[in-house]
């Protein structure tokens, strides 16, 4: 079963770590927490046409307890969109995508996208 994993992202309690080479402005000293689960749902809604075109089923498993994280909301949304869009592109028609959030440790959120086979 192919798998594409997202990056572990610091929780709201952890300090924000900027991505090197980033062109975006720095975050304010105290950025408001971002609801990662809401962003994942929003991205899936935005990509619904692509999902429908491939006749994909989507299994959303938002099981992480620590889903409020500190970071650049727009950058996080774009990262999730890229991750899920890449999975849609690689998925076979009629397949299934699972988008799952977990907390592998107290200071991280993991977003994992897996594909289950359909037909070509």
Image (spheres, rainbow, N blue to C red):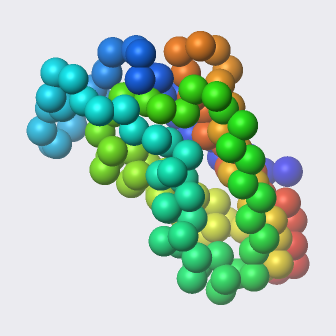
Q: Residue at x 57, y 82 (%)?
A: 49
Indicate left or right for 107 with 52 as reference. Answer: left
Q: Is residue 86 visible?
A: no
Q: What is the tally of numbered marks visible in this picture?
A: 0
Task: Indicate the quadrant where residue 20 lies.
Answer: top left
Compare residues 68 and 16 and report the one nearer the observer.
Answer: 68
Which quadrant holds residue 103? top right
Nearest to the observer: residue 70 or residue 5:
70
In this picture, residue 119 sits left or right of residue 69? right
Above or below, 66 relative to 61: above
Quarter of the image with the C terminus in it: bottom right
Image location of residue 76, percent across then percent down: 39, 44
Instruction: Tell me if 52 is positioned left or right of 72 in this view.
Output: right
Q: How far from the left and from the top, in percent, is residue 62?
A: 68, 43
Q: In which quarter of the image is residue 57?
A: bottom right
Q: Name which residue lies at 29% across and 39% down.
A: 72
Q: Is 41 situated left or right of 78 in this image?
A: right
Q: In this view, does 51 lie above or below 33?
A: below
Looking at the picture, how far across and down is residue 73, in whole percent? Answer: 33, 44
**Coordinates of residue 43 in the picture (x, y in percent):** 50, 62
Q: Which residue is drawn at 61% across and 40% down?
A: 111
Which residue sits furthest bottom?
53
27 or 38: which is nearer to us?
A: 38
Res. 56 visible in picture: yes
Residue at 77% across, 58% down: 59
């Amino acid at each position: 079963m192919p798998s594409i994993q997202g990056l572990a992202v610091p929780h709201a309690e952890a300090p924000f770590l900027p991505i090197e080479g980033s062109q975006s402005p720095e975050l304010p000293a105290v950025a408001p927490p971002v609801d990662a689960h809401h962003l994942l749902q929003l991205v899936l809604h935005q990509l619904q046409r692509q999902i429908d075109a491939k006749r994909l089923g989507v299994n959303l498993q938002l099981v992480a307890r620590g889903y409020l994280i500190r970071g650049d909301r727009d950058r996080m949304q774009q990262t999730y969109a890229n991750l899920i869009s890449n999975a849609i592109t690689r998925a076979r028609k009629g397949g299934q995508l699972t988008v799952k959030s977990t907390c592998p440790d107290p200071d991280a959120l993991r977003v994992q996208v897996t594909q289950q086979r359909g037909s070509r």
